[in-house]
Amino acid sequence: MAMITRFQAEKSGVHMEALQYQRMMDKQSEYDEEAIQILKDLLLKKRKTHELEKKVKYIEQIFTGVILAKELVNAPTNVVTPVVLAEEAEKIAASYSDVMTAKISDTEQCVELKMGSYLGVADASTDLPKFIHLCYKPPSESIKTKLAMVGERLNFDSGGYNIKTGPGCSIEMMNCDMGSSSAVLGAVKALGQIKPQGVEVHFIVAPISSVVLIFDVKSV
């Protein structure tokens, strides 16, 4: 077991080192495939077994989700809007349609569901809210466990009228407020490939933009 744990750590490091992040260069982020293969061969050289090969595949599936999460949280908020995030969720569901479904609720549907607090934040922005519900369910399998993952998602937490100033205020880093929802979508992508049996998982992401415009909700 210790060898497997060490191997997983080594293989994870390989993937992180070989990733070439190019999203903001009008290119798809990609791996240095030659580096991946060389390092994979080195890791497996003296301990190649069927079990370890399965671990390699498992780690590669996990890291497709990790990379998606990193790309989403690193992207500027004018690029990854709630609409774009919903499109990404639908793309993932379509890629793994044998086990994954997606339901995207727009503003009118959220009004019908009486989601006033959620819509109140979104009303200040010109970016339309999109409430995302993805469901993983293996086909023709008895479900023994049901789980849920929820990712809060502000594209950029402006803090309303920002009064954060000085060193350490970190207002320029508030796109990281969408980290949890990025992690959830990354988990969706990984799970769609791993396809665990006997479990049904619901993924909820509620993306909105927190900005101050003439439409903002004001306290009385």
Image (tube, rainbow, N blue to C red):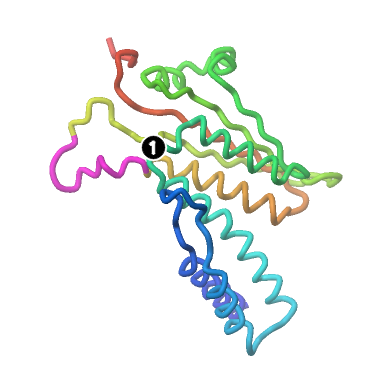
> What is the residue that sits farthest to the bottom in this orientation?
46
Left or right of residue 163: residue 107: right
> What is the residue that sits farthest to the front in this orientation?
26
Expressed as whole percent of the image width and height from the top left, the position of residue 104 reads 61, 28
Expressed as whole percent of the image width and height from the top left, the position of residue 70 reads 46, 52
Magenta-drawn segment: 164-175
Instruction: Report the residue marked by disc 1.
Output: 77
User: Is residue 99 shown in magenta?
Assistant: no
Closer-to-camera residue (153/126): 126
Closer-to-camera residue (123/84): 84
Closer-to-camera residue (130/206): 130
Q: Quarter of the image holding residue 33?
A: bottom right
Q: Quarter of the image holding residue 77?
A: top left
Mark 1, residues whose alpha carbon is within 10 Å: few (<14), some, or many (≥20)? some
> What is the residue that sits farthest to the right in this orientation?
140
Question: What is the count of numbered marks?
Answer: 1
Q: Amino acid at mark 1?
A: Thr
Q: Quadrant of the C terminus?
A: top left
- Residue at 58% of width from left, 84% of height from top? 42
Left or right of residue 203: residue 75: left
Q: Is residue 90 placed above or below 2 in the rendered structure?
A: above
- Residue at 15% of width from left, 47% of height from top? 167
- Residue at 42% of width from left, 22% of height from top? 122
Q: Quadrant of the N terminus?
A: bottom right
Expressed as whole percent of the image width and height from the top left, the position of residue 76 reads 38, 41
Q: Is residue 210 placed above or below 90 in the rendered structure?
A: above
Q: Secondary structure at mark 1?
A: loop
- Residue at 47% of width from left, 44% of height from top? 180
Expressed as whole percent of the image width and height from the top left, the position of residue 87 reads 58, 35
Q: Quarter of the image holding residue 2?
A: bottom right
